[in-house]
């Protein structure tokens, strides 16, 4: 029996100006890019896996496009797969943020709430809970697909690869994530 896997697919390019902070901001994604991402993903995925997606529309659009190509897939929204909430920073250009505010975030990377939004430790807790569900046999022993965001992909990488008790610091945080419309695969067992 092969190991069960977690497929992490990132939404297509959102319709937002480059350089804009848009974690929890509910933006649509480019329709043509979403359709192309769904086509490629539909061809790559195994049959009958469990599909969970962020409730933000850029992920839901990809999930629905994928289901249109793969009716064997049943979708379920999961709020734990949402991107980080950047509070008052949402919708603002990153280069408009005060340097002192960015520095405060990186100095207390785990606990600071950027823009008054969500602390990374809280995001890690919710993604960790979703990951434990995926690792359990609650999905009938099947592979699991998450249609989600770069921040969630980085959380999964941290949770699966960081040494136990490792300090959560900005300079140790994973920077790699799937490109828009791409995916990565992790073993669950």
Image (tube, helix red, strand yellow):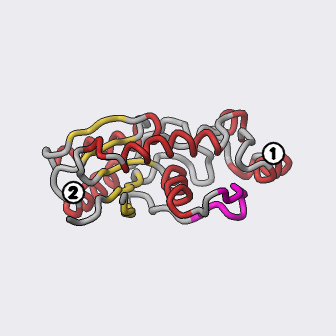
Horizontal side of residue 126 vs 120, given as left or right: left
Q: Quadrant of the N terminus?
A: bottom left
For the point 13% across and 44% down, which residue is it? 71
Q: Is residue 79 above or below residue 162?
A: above
Relative image position of residue 49 (x, y in whole percent): 22, 50
| Mark linked to residue 101 | 1
* Main secondary structure along the magenta-highlighted residues: loop
For the point 23% across and 66% down, which residue is it? 2
**Quadrant housing residue 140:** top left
Horizontal side of residue 50 vs 164, given as left or right: left
Relative image position of residue 44 (x, y in whole percent): 23, 63
Horizontal side of residue 168 vs 129, given as left or right: right
Q: Quadrant of the C terminus?
A: bottom left
Q: How many marks?
A: 2
Q: Which residue is mark 2?
A: 42
Instruction: Specify few, some or many for label 1: CA neighbours under 10 Å numbering under 14, 14-19, or 20 or more.
Output: few
The stretch in magenta equals 165-175
Relative image position of residue 139 (x, y in whole percent): 27, 44
For the point 31% across and 51% down, which residue is it? 145
Mark 2 lies on a secondary structure that is helix
For the point 45% across and 62% down, which residue is it? 178
């Amino acid at each position: 029996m092969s190991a069960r896997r977690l497929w992490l697919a990132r939404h297509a390019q959102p319709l937002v100006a480059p350089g804009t902070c848009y974690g929890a901001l509910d933006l649509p994604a480019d329709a043509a890019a979403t359709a192309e991402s769904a086509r490629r993903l539909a061809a790559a995925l195994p049959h009958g896996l469990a599909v969970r997606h962020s409730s933000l529309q850029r992920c839901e659009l990809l999930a629905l496009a994928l289901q249109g190509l793969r009716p064997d897939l049943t979708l379920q929204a999961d709020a734990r797969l949402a991107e980080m909430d950047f509070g008052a920073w949402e919708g603002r250009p990153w280069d408009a943020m005060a340097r002192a505010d960015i520095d405060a975030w990186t100095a207390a990377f785990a606990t600071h709430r950027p823009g008054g939004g969500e602390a990374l430790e809280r995001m890690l807790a919710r993604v960790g809970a979703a990951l434990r569900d995926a690792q359990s046999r609650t999905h009938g022993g099947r592979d699991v697909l998450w249609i989600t965001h770069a921040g969630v992909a980085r959380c999964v990488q941290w949770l699966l690869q960081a040494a136990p008790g490792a300090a959560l610091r900005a300079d140790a945080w994973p920077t790699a994530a799937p490109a828009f419309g791409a995916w990565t695969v992790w073993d669950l067992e």
